[in-house]
Image (spheres, grey):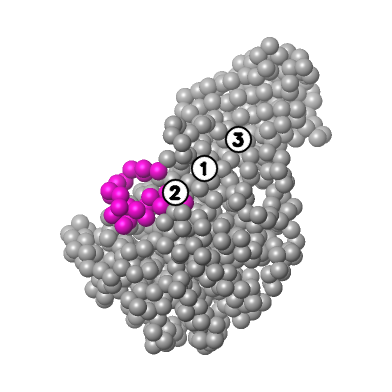
Amino acid sequence: MAVSRRKLIGSIAAGSALAAVSPADLLPALRAAARAASPPGDVVGKITVGYQGWFSCPGDGAPIGGWWHWSRDRFQSPSPTNTTIVSWPDMREFTRGYPTAYPALGDGRPATLFSSYDQQTVDTHFRWMQEHGCDTAALQRFNPFGDEGPTRDAMAVKVRSAAERFGRKFYVMYDVTGWTAMQSQLKEDWTTKMSAHTASPAYARQNGRPVVCVWGFGFNDDGRPFAPAACLDVVNWLKAQGCYVIGGVPTYWRQGINDSRPGFADVYHAFHMLSPWMVGRTGTLDGLDWFHTNVNVPDLADCAAYGIDYQPCVMPGDLSAGHRRHGDFYWRHFYNVTRLGAQGVYVSMFDEFNEGNQIAKTSETQASTPAGVGIRALDEDGTRCSADYYLRLTADGGRMFKRQLALTPVRPTPPVTGGGPPPPVDLAAGRPTSASSQNGPYTAGNAVDGDPGSYWESTNGVFPQWLQVDLGGPVTVGRVVLRLPPPAVWQRRTQTLSVEVSPDGANWSTAVGSAGRVFDPATGNQVTLTFPATSARYVRIRITGNTGWPAGQLSQFEVWAA
């Protein structure tokens, strides 16, 4: 099974071995940016999306069998302890879903996943591309000489069919990770199999040549140990076959430092287009701006000097790490590459649910995500986003890149369609919980499962007790809502409690001081506590007394954004 790129390439801190570029150095670089090496084609002037197409499920007919790329052990059903994904797809437009061992979704529906091997899945993805201005898909192709080969061969046929049907372009993007015999086998694969797809009217062409990409030359890790001579041989061979060759290269390719091996300058400069990797490099807006000034601008100047097209990578951000900022991170990336004057854009990725940087339709809330397993939905920072939000952002970002929208650092795309502000969401719903203790089946997770009848109860006769929720990342919060089971069942009681917040689960501060809080059937057994807006990842309720029962008790623990 192919390994995700992030597992082989650790995050590289901005500036770890790179001096900032002086303002005087920027001017010639910016002037050079205006000189495009190639005219518009299927990658120059276009929005390209990386397409994995690597998910399979038992019963879908894929030769590889099992839960390919959904599970660590693909012969066992995906579950919270046997998984490779950090995000959950929105399943509403797929005609077939495959049951998993995950808990049911927050709204009670079974947790099912799609198979890329179903043509309807690929067709749905390419229809989304058509609807949202994704011009070209780069089909990822790892070593096809092992057990993955027949399935990857079939996926190329399915992608070709979908591209032809929906008027999109596609090209083969070889990923050489772990491919020991790459130098000879890549040539064999192109000659005997993949080159046949260039006969399709949907196959991408640039400067009249069929496009092919090789991702991974020069990376400074054990998964790609190839010498410069072997890499240069492959690039020149593909060029001799009449191809327009793109290099998926390290972030610091130009200097040969950090993630790039030294001695690869001739390899990098042999490509027709360079597309440096960015996933895992930064998760902040300041970080994107730093890379724009210190990496992208001089990169583009170097490419212009050598007559090479430049296709920087843009990314929506890792949803599981809280990088997205309800679209602001993705928009800043589009804004930066547009003002840069890059020749093309490579979106990473379309369907990468494994690393959380997918733009394909994703679960909107915990209601459409497996309950209690810690997978973030699109509303993870308190802003409700429609499942197609990052596709719509791609469409608007593409229009800005093509000068069909004015260049603007301000995101014009609303998180939800239909106008008006998005409705607020409970940030604690379905999130991981813990407690000082629990009494039998009355576990901490009951307080965030959405069921008003289930509840958490601590060990009896011992105080203080506490219940806390992990929001998954820093969120600005300002309100907590606490409930006990329905008034018809539970009588009035007072619990003495306080609200504490923490950025890391170790250092706590008090947001609401300790006081008796009345849970009254007349008001729905509900207590609402507000406090000044504060950033927190963890929110804890500390209970020191209960007049109705000698334990801490809560059936619903809600946390709301300020």
Residue range (magenta): 391-413
Secondary structure beneath label 2:
helix
Secondary structure beneath label 1:
loop
Q: Which of 466 and 365 is in front in this view?
A: 365
Whether residue 494 is situated above or below residue 101 in the rendered picture: above
Q: In which quarter of the image is the N terminus?
A: bottom right
Across and down, in percent, residue 433 comes to 66, 38
Whether residue 29 is situated above or below residue 411 in the rendered picture: below
Q: From the viewer's perspective, is 458 left or right of 145?
A: right
The disc placed on residue 428 is 3
Across and down, in percent, residue 455 comes to 74, 29
Give yes or no for residue 227 being in the magenta stretch. no
Instruction: Tell me the amino acid under the disc marked 3.
Output: Ala
Residues at marks 1 and 2 touching, judged by CB atoms closer than 8 Å: yes
Q: Residue furthest front?
A: 165
Give the labeled residue for mark 1.
386
Give the labeled residue for mark 2.
392
Residue at 75%, 27% in the rendered image: 453
Q: Distance between the residues labelled 3 and 1?
A: 19 Å
Residue at 77%, 17% in the rendered image: 488
